[in-house]
């Protein structure tokens, strides 16, 4: 957006996002009682990532931001992935 | 403070606050916070790989119910903060103040829960460099060490976020933050959402691992 005017989120959208977040929290707690072997951790992280994406996109308005914030955010996440990925790689295959 | 910037095509930008610039600045700060907690999560990942059984065993000692309640509190407070910005921008000042007060209360209850949680662990002799942990197997010591560092740093962020919300509340009440000038509320909100984001990862990593 060039105007600098921030997108105005409606209460309905925000409430819908909240409901989705609460449902996902319920699912992640329920799943934690079931032993899925090696799939527990990836599934838990997938749900957490979905929740984080919802908060970022709607509560933090990332969806409606301009290019500067979007690109720098993706850059930060790439850096984080490299930091976590390469460190963990070293530890796991030492 | 109230300059008028005139563009070449004659359109004017009044108010003198660079909204995009303000947001970019806040996001740059949030990136440093993401990397800060990212570093701690690397530590968690590396030790989880080394002591998976210990992490699963001691994770069960944390109270899932309190953890879940705190998650819901932070999610609801994130919603009320986001809604308070909408309310302020639509000129509904009282609703905005009410929503901010609810968010602040959620943060307070979160910290009270944390107090009881930590207090219970302390009573069991599980606190950093306690005799019970010093003599325990390394996995236990590391799990609770990470637990205290990460939830402690997160708790500090909750406290800072609540301070920012309180400042926003006062500024809205004194009509210093209005439907046209809402940067303080917007940026405090961004900080509060970040606190929520971090908790979304902390909760399953510590409380829900099998």
Image (spheres, coloured by chain):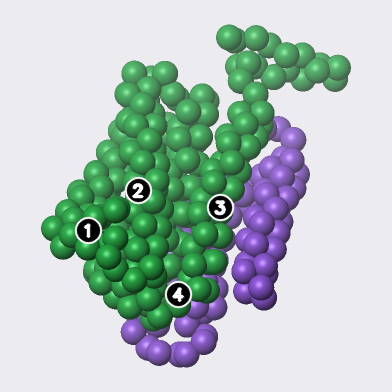
Chain colours: A purple, B green
Q: Secondary structure at mark 1?
A: helix
Residues marked 1 and 3, same chain: yes
Q: Which mark is nearer the camera, 1 or 3?
A: 1
How far, Cα to Cα, is label 1 from label 2? Answer: 20 Å
Residue assigned mark 3: B39
Residue A71, compared with residue A17, is above or below; it is above
Residue found at the far right of this picture: B8
Mark 2 touches mark 3? (CB < 8 Å): no
Mark 1 on the same chain as mark 4: yes
Q: Does dot 2 land on a helix, a strand or a loop?
A: helix
**How far apart are the alpha carbons under marks 2 and 3?**
15 Å
Looking at marks 1 and 4 on the same chain, the residue that comes earlier in the sequence is marked by: 4
Helix, strand or loop for disc 4: loop
Q: Say above or below: B80 vs A39.
A: above
Q: Chain of mark 3?
A: B
Badge 1 or badge 2: first in the primary sequence: 1
Relative to B159, A38 lies left or right: right
Q: Residue furthest front?
A: B135
Q: Is residue B170 left or right of residue B11?
A: left
- Residue hosting label 2: B152
Q: Nearer the viewer, mark 1 or mark 2?
A: 1
B128 sits left or right of A79 in the view: left
Estimate how packed mark 4 is, as few (under 14), some (14 to 19) or many (20 or more) residues with alpha carbons within 10 Å.
Answer: some
Element under label 3? helix
Residue B126: x %, y % from top left: 23, 60
Q: Earlier in the sequence, mark 2 or mark 4?
A: 4
How far apart are labels 2 and 4 at the CA level? 22 Å
Closer to us: B156 or A20: B156
Disc marking residue B51: 4
Q: Which residue is mark 1?
A: B131
Q: Quadrant of the N terminus of chain B?
A: top right
């Amino acid at each position: 957006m060039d105007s600098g005017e921030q997108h105005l989120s409606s209460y309905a959208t925000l409430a819908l996002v909240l409901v989705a977040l609460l449902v996902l929290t319920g699912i992640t707690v329920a799943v934690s009682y079931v032993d899925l072997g090696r799939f527990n951790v990836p599934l838990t992280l997938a749900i957490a990532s979905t929740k984080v994406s919802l908060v970022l996109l709607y509560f933090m308005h990332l969806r409606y931001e301009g290019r500067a914030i979007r690109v720098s955010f993706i850059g930060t996440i790439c850096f984080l992935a490299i930091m976590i990925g390469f460190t963990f790689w070293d530890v796991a295959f030492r | 403070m109230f300059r008028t910037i005139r563009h070449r095509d004659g359109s004017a930008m009044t108010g003198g606050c660079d909204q995009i610039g303000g947001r970019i600045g806040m996001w740059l700060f949030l990136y440093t916070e993401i990397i800060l907690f990212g570093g701690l999560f690397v530590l968690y990942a590396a030790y989880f790989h080394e002591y998976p059984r210990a992490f699963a065993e001691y994770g069960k000692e944390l109270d899932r119910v309190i953890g879940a309640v705190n998650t819901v509190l932070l999610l609801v407070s994130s919603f009320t903060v986001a809604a308070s910005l909408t309310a302020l921008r639509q000129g509904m000042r009282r609703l905005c103040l009410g929503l901010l007060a609810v968010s602040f209360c959620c943060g307070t209850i979160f910290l009270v829960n944390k107090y009881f949680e930590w207090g219970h662990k302390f009573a069991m002799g599980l606190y950093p460099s306690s005799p019970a942990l010093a003599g325990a197997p390394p996995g236990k010591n590391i799990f609770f060490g990470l637990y205290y560092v990460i939830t402690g740093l997160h708790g500090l962020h909750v406290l800072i976020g609540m301070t920012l919300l309180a400042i926003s509340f006062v500024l809205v009440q004194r009509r210093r933050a209005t439907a046209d000038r809402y940067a303080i509320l917007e940026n405090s909100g961004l900080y509060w959402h970040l606190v929520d984001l971090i908790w979304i990862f902390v909760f399953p990593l510590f409380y829900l691992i099998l």
